[in-house]
Amino acid sequence: MTEQFSRKAEAWSARFSEPMSALLKRYTASVSFDQRLAFVDIEGSLAHAEMLHHVGILSHDDHAAIVGGMGRIRHEIESGGFKWSIDLEDVHLNIERRLTELVGDAGKRLHTARSRNDQVATDMRLWLRGAVDLLRKRLAAVQTSLLDLADGHAETILPGFTHMQVAQPVTFGHHLLAYVEMFARDDERFADCRKRINRLPLGAAALAGTSFPIDRERVAKTMGFDEVCHNSLDAVSDRDFAIEFASAASLAMMHISRLSEELVLWMSPRFGFIDIADRFCTGSSIMPQKKNPDAAELARGKTGRVYGDLMGLLTLMKGQPLTYNKDNQEDKEPLFDAADTLDDTLAIFAEMIAGITVKPDAMRAAALEGFATATDLADYLVKKGLPFRDAHEAVAHAVRVCADRGVDLSDLKLAELRAAVGPAGDVITDDVHAALTLEGSVASRSHVGGTAPLRVRDEIALHRMRLRER
Ligand code: ARG
C-alpha cells in the first residue's frame, strides 16, 4: 500500500489530532472487496436522493446534479477508469468523495438523513437479492439437465443401494429425480429466504432513525423492496438474512456433493455406469490412462468451503451487542464466496450432467448381482397368504442356497425355487418369474414416489411444469 497518511483524505478529519496508522488503515479498509457493491450502492443512493428531493430536503438542482454525477461514476467504474483509494476505506466513501469532486456541494448533501450503517445494510440486501435470483435460475438449469437425462432413462435399470450394498432394482430416471426433488427444495429455501432479504433498512440511519421527514415507503418502492424494516436498531445490525442465505447455499452444496460422490463412483471403472464428457475431466501428469472426474471431486471439496462461510457468518454475529459493530464488515467475503462458489458449481453441473453418457448394460449387469429381487419374492409369498416375517425367512434361506450355487433367484427352475424356499415354497407357481425379473420388480412399484417407468414419466412432466411456472 503506497497511500500517504492523510486525515484530509478521510471522511472524519476534524475529530483527530494525528494521522491514522498505516497498519490500521490497511486493516480496516474494505474497498478491495466491497467495491463489488458499487452498482447497488449507486442504486440505493439514487433512490435516497430522489426521496430527499420529493420531500423537499434536496433541491431540484442538487438532485439533478447527483443523478448526473452518479451516471458518470457508473460509467467510470464500468470502464475501469474509477480510482479506488484505501484512504477512503470502503465503497461508500469512495463513491461519495468522487461524487463531490464531480458535483460539489450537492454531493455533500447526499448523506443527509442516512448513515453508512443503513447504507451498507441496504447494499447487502440489494446485492443478495440479485444473487438469489441468479442462483434460482442456475438451480433450474441443473434440474432441467437432470430431467432431460431422466427422460431418456425412465426404463433403464440399475441397482439401488443401501449401506452401499445392492438392495433393490430402481430405474435410473427415478434415481436422477431424487436429485431434482432435492434441488426443488433448495429453490424453495432460496425463494423463502428472499422474502426476508427484501426488506429495506434505509431510514434507520446510524441506529436511531433520523429527525428528517423521510419517506421510507417511497424508497422501498423505488428499489422493489417488499416492505421496510420496522426497527432501526435491528435494521442496521442484524445479518441473519445473510446467514439464512449461506445456510440455504450450504444445503444446496451438500446435495451437489452427494451427487458428486455418485458421479465419481459411477465413473470409476469398477462401476462403469456412466462416462463424463472429456471437457469436464482431467488427465494425470504421470498415468497416461487416467481420466478423472475432477469437477465432481472439486465440487465435493468446495462444499466444505461454503459450510465454512456459513460458520464464519454465524460466529461473526454471535455475541454482537446492538447495534452496528465493525465486525459486520466481515460479512462480505464469506457471503460473496458462498454465492460465487454455488454459482460456478451449478453452472458447471448443468453442463456436465447434459454431457453424461449412460451405460445401461453395466447398470443392468450390476442389478442382476446381489439378489436385488429377493424382496419381490418375499412380497410374492405374502400375496399368496404367508405372513411377511415368515416369507422373509424363507427367502433368506433361498438366497443362501443360490449364493452357495453361484446363481440368481431368477435362474432357478420352478421346482428348484420351491425347494430352495422350503415348505413355504408350495404356494409358488409359474407366475413367480414375472415378479423376479428386474422389469417386473420396478414396474410393480407404480404408486406415487415409486420407481416404475410410468411414474418416472409422470414426475418428469410435473417437474417440467413447475419449472415453467417458476
Ligand atoms: N464498510 C462498512 C461495513 O461494511 C460500512 C459501514 C461502516 N459504518 C461505520 N460506522 N463504520 O460494515
Image (cartoon, rainbow, N blue to C red):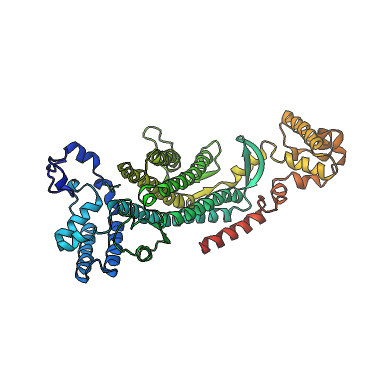
Image-quadrant location for residue 55: bottom left
Q: Is residue 379 left or right of residue 347?
A: right
Residue 80 seen in the figure: no
Q: Look at 21% across and 69% down and name the residue there.
A: 59
Q: In the displayed image of the protein, which residue is found farthest to the top?
A: 404
- Placement of 294 over or under 451, stated as above or below: above
> Residue 129 placed where, x, y %?
40, 56
Q: Is residue 245 left or right of residue 391?
A: left
Q: Look at 53% across and 44% down and name the residue there.
A: 274
> Residue 2 placed where, x, y %?
13, 41
Quadrant occupied by the N terminus? top left
The foreground one among 19 and 38 is: 19
- Placement of 413 over or under 79, stated as above or below: above
The foreground one among 97 and 298 is: 97
> Residue 163 placed where, x, y %?
61, 34
Image-quadrant location for residue 64: bottom left
How many numbered discs, if any? 0
- Placement of 380 over or under 420, stated as above or below: below
